[in-house]
Image (cartoon, grey):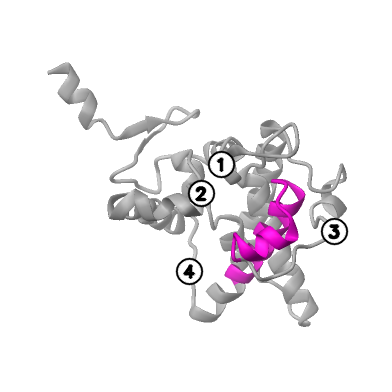
Amino acid sequence: MARDHQAQRAWVRMPSGRRLDLLDPTPFDWDDSDLALGLARTYRWGGHSAWPLPLSVAQHSLTVMHVRAAACQSAGLTLAPLSALRELLHDAEEGLLGFDCVSPLKPFMGDAFKTLSQKLEAAVFLRYGLPRWTVKEHAAHKLADRLAAASEAVHVAGWSAQEVRQTLKITVPPLSDDPLQAIYGGTAWEPWPPAVAAERFLDQLDQLKILCA
């Protein structure tokens, strides 16, 4: 009986003490610090890195947000706070799940995993009042996300620019300058320790929530 009960358990305990039901999540199952820490401890590129530390999804999320903001600025526009918040939280479900599935593995994960991820994403969007992507906005987001990925592949994971194009099939050229270095200092493209990534992500989240209120 104990084994059957354990097999049916689908919730995880958050550091705050809240319980997240992975199969039936609600917007009240975590707090902001849980999310920030989860994203800071969830790693891109399967955890592989040319640096001493792997790159967290928290740091990646900040990069995508700033790349998207820079693209708007280049077009003479300003990224609205709610849109910036949606960029910051675009991978939030990965922090709640504690897993960033590498792209080649996703087809093997099946529809059940896809549904689980979609439910978590829906709970995130509901909690933070995020509007659904329009086709135009999602295209702009994906461009920023691919630009961040190409740059991380070269500067963090150790891929060559040719491998990024031919193997990863990312056609946008990687950035030379790290958009986060101008804001936070440090060494360009160096992955942050989890505590630093969590603190910076949470600070940005708090700022945007105030602007969106």
Q: Find out whether residue 31 is within the magenta segment.
A: no
Magenta highlight on residue 160: yes
User: Can you identify the residue that label 4 sits on?
Assistant: 131
Looking at the image, is 124 positioned above or below residue 39?
A: below
Check disc 2 and report its element: helix, strand or loop: loop
Q: Is mark 1 on a helix, strand or loop?
A: helix
Specify start and end residues of the magenta stretch as a single range. Answer: 141-169
Image x and y of residue 85, in percent: 60, 60
Q: Residue furthest top?
A: 2
Q: Which amino acid does label 2 sit on?
A: Val
Badge 4, how many Cα within 10 Å: few under 14, some, many 20+?
A: few
Left or right of 5? Residue 71 is right
- Label 1 to label 4: alpha-carbon separation: 30 Å
Q: Is residue 175 above or below residue 198?
A: below
* Tag 3 residue: 177
Q: Which amino acid does label 1 sit on?
A: Gly
Marked residue nearer the N-terminal end (4 or 3):
4
Residue 109 percent location from the top left of the image: 35, 49
C-beta proximity under 8 Å, tags 1 and 3: no
**How busy is the neighbourhood of tag 2: few (under 14 within 10 Å), some, or many (20 plus)?**
few
* Category of crowding for the residue at label 3, using alpha-carbon neighbours closer than 10 angstroms: few (below 14), some (14–19), many (at least 20): few
Q: Earlier in the sequence, mark 2 or mark 3?
A: 2
Residue displayed at 78% across by 82% down: 76
Mark 1 = which residue? Answer: 46
Residue 102 is labelled as 2
Query: Sequence-wise, which precedes: disc 4 or disc 2?
Result: 2
> Which x, y percent locates residue 73?
78, 75
**What's the residue at 49%, 29% (across, down)?**
16
